[in-house]
Image (cartoon, rainbow, N blue to C red):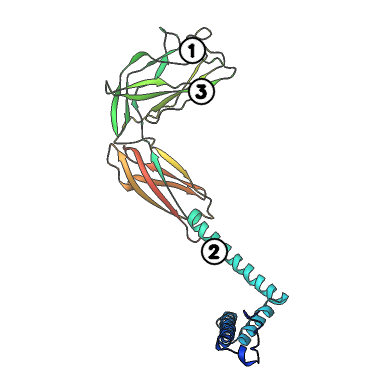
Amino acid sequence: MALPNSTITKIPNNEPDAVPALWNLRYEEIDQNFSFLEQGRAQMRSELDAAKGNKGSVGERLDDMSAQLQSLSPDYQDDLSAAVMFGLDQAAVANRSVQALKEQAQQEGEVTISNRGVVSGCSVSRSTTAARNLNLENGIAFMNGRIYAAPEKENAASVPSNTGTSSVTVYAYLYFHEATQRMRVSVTAIGEEVPEHGIHIYTITIPADSTDETDPNLDYVTLTNVRRMEPEFPANLQSPRTETIAIKDLRESDYRIDIDLVSAVGEPCRSEQVEITSRATNGFTLRLATGADDVVVRWRVSKLNN
């Protein structure tokens, strides 16, 4: 670190040249050097303070650094790695336990149970007056917790043609006709399911190459009756609606099931009218003991000792 005035010119010894102006210049140069040294000293003091950190002296700081370096020995690193791995293993165990509690020991969900069917009649038959048509027999159906008339109708619905090389399945269903406030019958298109508010009454199997030309009278078409008959609805249900709910496997089937009735359409529905009829380690079955329709149920399965 060089001084700003590293060389100060000597004042001449001869009397005429030793004037005060020369002395003043030399004093200024010396003052500049002292000022520079003081700045350097302050900088060194600042660097020493930084080097000490939170210790009382640089020596204490060096001792502390030495201890830290010794702690990084191979044996210490092995011990530290083992401790970290053990901690990670314990955290993984805890995480799996929490996950099992959330997804298995306590499970919950929501299900909507529809309750529709036929009180009487409502059978379908092949038409004899129109190609590939079905007739509907007079009857009574129920949905929305109420009963509705289903008047007899000839050529009430048509069965689609199947031009493919393999048989297909379609469905005949009853639906509520707003304008007449009566039930009518329809048949789904190939590849479609029964609409959400339809009542499935027949499954229809159409063979390959079945068209107006090859089978106008539906002689080779199979009509399978799947009507749910409840002649004493709503006072007495002979085949109550059931719903099987799948759950993640538990070790035993002695788990607790809590039922919360959210809503129902039509007749009143109480919680005790949603009955638990069976349970297994992978699911349970609910039975609806009411004439209500579209019953929304929240359920919770608990087995804390699983």
Instruction: Name the outermost residue toward the right.
Output: 74
Task: Give the crowd class for mark 3: few <14, some 14-19, many >=20 residues within 10 Å.
Answer: some
Cα–Cα span, label 3 and label 1: 14 Å
Q: Position of residue 235 (x, y in %)?
A: 29, 36
Q: Earlier in the sequence, mark 2 or mark 1?
A: 2
Cα–Cα span, label 3 and label 2: 51 Å
**Residue 30, quarter of the rendered image:** bottom right
Cα–Cα span, label 2 and label 1: 65 Å
Q: Is residue 53 above or below residue 228?
A: below
Foreground of the two, 167 or 274: 167
Q: Quadrant of the N terminus?
A: bottom right
Q: Earlier in the sequence, mark 3 or mark 1?
A: 3
Q: Which residue is mark 2?
A: 94
Identified by mark 1, the residue type is Leu
Identified by mark 2, the residue type is Ala
Secondary structure of the residue carrying numbered label 1: loop
Which residue appears at 41% of the width and 42% of the height? 111
Q: Total label count?
A: 3
- Left or right: where 43 falls relative to 155: right
Circle 3/circle 1 CB separation < 8 Å: no
Q: Which residue is mark 3?
A: 169
Q: Is residue 286 above or below residue 93?
A: above
Task: Give the crowd class for mark 1: few <14, some 14-19, many >=20 residues within 10 Å.
Answer: many
Front of the two marks 3 and 2 = 2
Identified by mark 3, the residue type is Thr
Q: Is residue 133 above or below residue 61?
A: above
Q: Position of residue 73 (x, y in %)?
A: 71, 77
Q: Which residue is mark 1?
A: 218
Residue 222 seen anywhere in this rendered image of the structure: yes
Task: Give the crowd class for mark 2: few <14, some 14-19, many >=20 residues within 10 Å.
Answer: few
**Residue 266, quarter of the rendered image:** top left
Secondary structure of the residue carrying numbered label 3: strand
